Image (cartoon, rainbow, N blue to C red):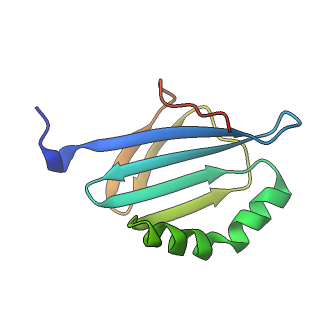
Amino acid sequence: GEGEEDREWKVDLRFDLGASTNLDARLNLKKDQLSVHVWCPSLTIYQEASVHKNWLIKEAEKLGLNISELRIYPSSKPSVISNSSIRGYSIDYRVDPGISIDA
């Protein structure tokens, strides 16, 4: 079986922003490294998220979360993301059954 150090958690979140617009996020936790990828199809929301990127990292730190990587994309989430390299980790992202939260 997998050891504690080999465990990897992936959580996909989708937020309904109205007007047929969604904001998608993927959280990936491996060891003590948390990477967050956010897809903002709305340019206005993308700009706001980019401006507040450092604030989000600091707020996460207050909760004891260390975000090792935060990427914000000005587009919808692609249906398949593959062969991404995140800080030395080779991760194969695929659309798979995950957690979908309507907020």
Q: Quadrant of the N terminus?
A: top left
Residue 87: x percent and y percent?
37, 63
Residue 57 or residue 78, whichever sits in front: 57
* Location of residue 94 with respect to 66 vertically, above or below: above
- In the current view of this chain or complex, which residue is farthest to the top? 97
* Location of residue 54 with respect to 96 vertically, above or below: below
Q: Quadrant of residue 100?
A: top right
- In the current view of this chain or complex, which residue is farthest to the right? 19
* Location of residue 71 with respect to 80 vertically, above or below: below
* Location of residue 26 with respect to 96 vertically, above or below: below
Residue 24: x percent and y percent?
64, 43
Residue at x 40%, y 64% (from the top left corner): 65
Q: Quadrant of the C terminus?
A: top right
Left or right: residue 13 compared with residue 6:
right
Residue 4: x percent and y percent?
15, 46
Q: Quadrant of residue 33?
A: bottom left
Left or right: residue 63 compared with residue 12:
left
Left or right: residue 87 compared with residue 60:
left
Residue at x 75%, y 59% (from the top left corner): 46
Residue 6 or residue 57, whichever sits in front: 57
Left or right: residue 54 compared with residue 19:
left
Residue at x 23%, y 43% (from the top left corner): 7
Residue 95: x percent and y percent?
52, 29
